[in-house]
Image (cartoon, grey):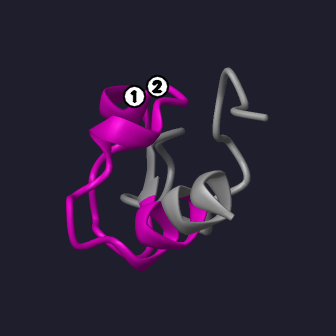
Amino acid sequence: MRKKFYIDYPQEKIEPGLNLYRCSICKKESLFINGLLDKHDVNCSYRLEQQKQLVD
């Protein structure tokens, strides 16, 4: 079953003092990703792993 939102990816803080985060794998900002798998980089290992689980 496909999840509606993917928020369990590893994140890192972009700048100290600001509440901005990004995927620690593909470096796309969390606000850009907005919980959507397709917004991760096409080569992001998190995205590839989640897509693989959808096929299995």
Q: Is 13 above or below relative to 33?
A: below
Query: Could you tell me which secondary element the residue under label 2 belongs to?
Result: loop
Q: Amino acid at mark 2?
A: Asn
Residue 53 location (% of width, % of height): 66, 63
Tally the marks: 2
Q: Which residues are magenta?
A: 23-50
- Residue drawn at point x = 68 percent, y = 42 percent: 7
Say which of 46 and 50 sits in front. Answer: 50
- Residue corresponding to mark 2: 34
- How busy is the neighbourhood of tag 1: few (under 14 within 10 Å), some, or many (20 plus)? few
Q: Amino acid at mark 1?
A: Leu
Q: Is 4 above or below relative to 48?
A: above
Q: Is residue 6 left or right of residue 43?
A: right
Q: Is residue 53 left or right of residue 42?
A: right
Question: Which quarter of the picture shows residue 47?
Answer: bottom left
- Residue corresponding to mark 1: 31
Residue 17 location (% of width, % of height): 51, 49
- Residue drawn at point x = 42 percent, y = 69 percent: 48
- Residue drawn at point x = 47 percent, y = 30 percent: 36
- Outermost residue on the front side: it is 56
Say which of 44 and 17 sits in front. Answer: 44
- The CA span between labels 2 and 1 is 5 Å
